[in-house]
Image: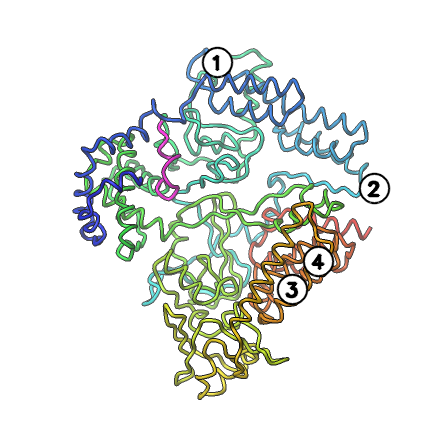
Amino acid sequence: MERLKSLIPDELKRVIGRSAPENLTKTSCLLLDFLRPLPQFQQVIRELTDPDLALCRKSKEAALGSKQKGNECFMKGDYVEALSFYSHALRHAPASSEMDVNLVATLYVNRASTMHAWYRRGKANASLKDYKHATHDLEVAVSMEDNPSRKSQIKGELSIVLSESSSSNEIGMVNNNGEDEKVDSLAQSKALVLQCVSSPHKGRGLTSAHDIPPASLVHREEPLAAILLKSCRETHCHFCFEELPADILFCPSCTIPVYCSKNCQEQAFGKHDTYLSKKILATDLEKHVMNAILANPTRSTGEDICSNHILEHRHECGGAHWSAVLPPDIVLAARLIVTSIEKCKASGTIFNPSDYLDFVHNYAQNPSVSKLESHVYAIVLLYCLHQYYNSDFPLSGASVAQLILVISQIKVNSMAVIHMKSHNRDEAFGKCSKFCTFGEHITQDTKQVKVAQAIYSRGSLFNHSCQPNVHAYFLSRTLFVHSVEVVPAWCPLELSYGPQVGELDLQGRQKLLKEQYSFQCRCSSCSELNLSDLVMNSFRCVRPYCLGAVLEATHSKRLESNFLQVSNGSCTFKLSLPLLSSKKDISDVAWMLLHERGANSHIAAGHCLSCGSCCDLEYSTAGSKSSLANIQRLKDSLDSDQIPDAFVSEMLSSLSHLRSVRHPYSKIVAEAEDNVAEAFVRIGELKFAVQHCVASIEILEKLYGSNHIVMGHELMKLASIQLCTGDRTAALSSIERVESIFLLYYGSHVDRIFPHLNVLRTEAERLAS
């Protein structure tokens, strides 16, 4: 879009930069009239909407080329590559003629043969007592097999192999993609009835007329519209957002989306008739092909198609590739508009976005650059939608203005759909004896992955708090919200939009929220002085045994009535001072703020907030940077063959120096301790690793609190290391803490979201026996 923006006259840019919601139709008309006759603009639209120019169209030539490569790999026994090429061929193969259908049918059979080869190789490895590779092959075969009876048979043979290999210290886990999921009465029960209320500072929000206990299911909702992020297009289903299996399906009309099952394919595109579905094939061939297409139609967790379901991909298809090129939030805006249009058609009413899209927006607060960008994207998107809807969405300034507001609504109301990174046996424990690789995995066991962007009608009404009382998570594309503490009746239900206490300090949280959501947070954590904000980036007092925090660049001034004015140069905040009886930790690190009204000269940058001692900030800052750089250098050396002889002593010396200048509760120290722990795991010094992992956790407990979700992730990492040391008792203790924390945040879905937790417990119980 940069080439279009470069064509716009400066005066028109200034007019658009000063625009407001009430005059969007005027500015939209001005820009539309300017761009419409330009050859450059017409070329952009052709490139996005003309099927003959699209890169996503079906191609028999590309399919045949991939099929040939797949055949070559299969003959060499390279089944992984063969499977990839056959799938690539299916993605590009057209199925619109009787001639094409034979190619598609052959590709399905070839792919099925490739997947069956994993089973045959697993059996061969088992007969040779190569249990490690046999286990791997059979696990792959289980994940690829869709026939229930065959799947059960392979699982049985896998269990035998695992039993025979138990003495070799290998651990297996069959990934059943959510089968036999444990669902308790809480998850099955209906969510609480929530009420929408308004407040002067936060506008609309949600609350309940009743007290809500901890770990309660507060809300569950399917999205109005959702879009997979570009980074996950080749690894996740484009409808349910789950990781793709081997036997993926594709859009029948283009090569953009991939699906994990026929159910997801039809929910995104709708049912479709092709020669493949009509043609009567030879009995054996028909069995292979239809099993491949129709197997396990409900692999995903999505609901069955209902009569009012909106097909979210159909309007994007037909050979055009604009949905693959435009940013995800712009495509999401289109899907939201389409949802409204289709609802209008179903009800026989006239389409008007304001009647259906009741979301707030921040267009008036957007900078000029963002306003111009929204105008350009809205016009381009209008032409893309017009290709499908024609008169239902006319090429007018009013239509552009509607799209601009929807794009603004998406920016402040959509949610990032987060999934946990999946694991397999080898990543968890299979390489435990080779610590150089195991360390990489334990630091990623519960890595959060942003897979999609979605907008939820009621979910968008949850307001933000930097110390939330509810937690949002996702199964497939479904939003779940759980309470994480007792929420009294009529208390606002608030989740985190990203930054939380313990993750960023006050200034960092305010900056992020202002930039992304255009508001200044006034939650209790941003209005009252808290320990985390005082210490997470602070330095240590020069006096021995003094826990006082030394701030680097923030100036504080004591006001009357127990308020504190805090300034960091760019903004000023007024904080209330906590009661001493309930905030002993704060008293320890900032005694003068709480007790001495005449201490203003001692609470500026470089002075201890507890005793008033002056610290040499230049020396402390330089020492901190030097220590962190050395720790990172030593850690990076593990990726090469140049590991220093004095690795351990240098690492401990750098950490000790960092601790001598940074506050004991500093998050910088916690992160350094974690890096040191990982480095020690990678060289096999597991006892050192446990010590430093525990040290990191102790600091994080001060910053987040003992039951915060971050503690669950860190404790699961600790349990992994403890198991490798053989300390079953300590590992079980850590695992029990993890389970209690995750049950609070995820309820009955813990096992499904964190399958690795079951692996840890299984290994701990195996050690006990």
**Quarter of the figure with residue 329:** top left
Earlier residue among tags 1 and 4: 1
- Find residue 167 and name its label: 2
Q: Position of residue 156 (x, y in %)?
A: 74, 33
- Amino acid beneath label 2: Ser
Labels 3 and 2: the sequence-earlier one: 2
Q: Position of residue 568 (x, y in %)?
A: 41, 70
Residue at image mark 1: 279
Magenta highlight: main SS: helix
> Splitting the image into 4 quarters, where does residue 332 fall?
top left
Q: Nearer the viewer, mark 4 or mark 2?
A: 4
What is the magenta range? 320-331
| Residue 452 visible within the image | yes
At label 3, counting other C-alpha atoms closer than 10 Å, the crowd grade (few under 14, some 14-19, many 20 or more) is: many
In the image, what residue type sits under mark 4? Ala
Residue pictured at 41% horizontal, 26% vertical: 254
